[in-house]
Amino acid sequence: MTRAFDGKRILVATHNAGKLEEMEQLFAPFGVDVVGAAELNLAEPEETETTFVGNARIKAHAAVSATGLPALADDSGIEVDGLDGAPGVYTADWAETPDGRDFVMAMTRTHSELVARNTAQPWTARFCSTLVLAWPDGHDEVFAGTVDGTLVWPMRGKLGHGYDPMFQPLGHTRTFAEMSHDEKNAISHRADSFAKLIAGCFG
């Protein structure tokens, strides 16, 4: 039995403006005030685990320790079958540069590695999102979501963030970056994990 959330304020442990915006939109119907880690000047903890749930736990519990607020952390990434599941938990690392994250560079690397391996199309992949909701007493709840699709090249669309311009969800003809926020939020990996969170802790 999962623990019900009965607070009015939740800290979303991310410095990613795109992720925070998605969470704000997803939480809007539930009357929960969302605050981001950047707004509270929280340091980003080192993500030392090799799984999505491990890294999400690190971020959630570090945020709780720093603020005393219940905290929700997401660790997400894209797993490409033709690259043996890479970049996976290292999705953001593939985009790191001295001047910040460059996902065009990361997507270009992904495409180049698929071509170098002579990987047959379609290039199947999935976005993964693991949410960890942690309370000040140390308790946490874990919810994992996925969305399957294929990678396209060249990139398409100007909306979204991260790998969205390269990812076409199964059953659709447009990439995430060609969809509105509402369209993407209805079918995304984060929508899947968030629906499980709502059912488990807010239902």
Image: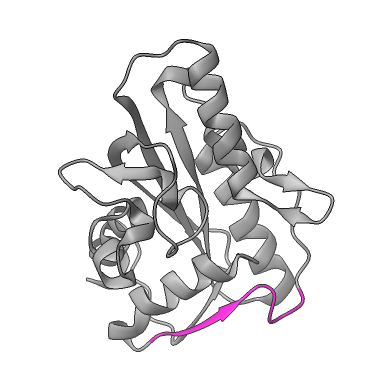
Residue 101 image point, x, y percent? 69, 53
The reply to whether residue 164 is visible in this rendering is yes
Kindly indicate the quadrant of the structure image that contains residue 147: top left
For image coordinates 30% across by 44% down, the residue present is 168
Residue 42 lies in the magenta-colored region: no
Magenta region, residue range: 32-41
Relative side of 196 to 154, left or right: left
Q: Between 40 and 132, which is closer to the camera in this rendering?
A: 40
Magenta span: predominant SS is: loop
| The image quarter in which residue 181 lies | bottom left
From the viewer's perspective, is 87 left or right of 183?
A: right
Name the quadrant of the C terminus.
bottom left
Q: Residue furthest left?
A: 171
Residue lying furthest front: 154
State the residue lying farthest toward the top.
118
- Image height of 98 relative to 38, above or below: above
| Residue at x-position 43% and y-position 28% | 80
Say above or below: 30 vs 142.
below
Relative to 161, say whether 56 is above or below: above
Q: Is residue 40 magenta?
A: yes
Does the image show residue 146? no
Compared to residue 103, the image places residue 200 above or below, namely below
The residue positioned 39% from the left and 51% from the top of the image is: 156
In-front residue for pair 116/200:
116
The picture places residue 99, in percent across and down from the top left corner, at 81, 56
Residue 97, image x, y percentages: 78, 47
Colour mode of the rendering: one colour
Q: Residue lying farthest right? A: 98
**Would residue 160 appear left or right of 87 to someone viewing this image?**
left
Tally of numbered tags: 0
Quadrant assignment for the N terminus? bottom left
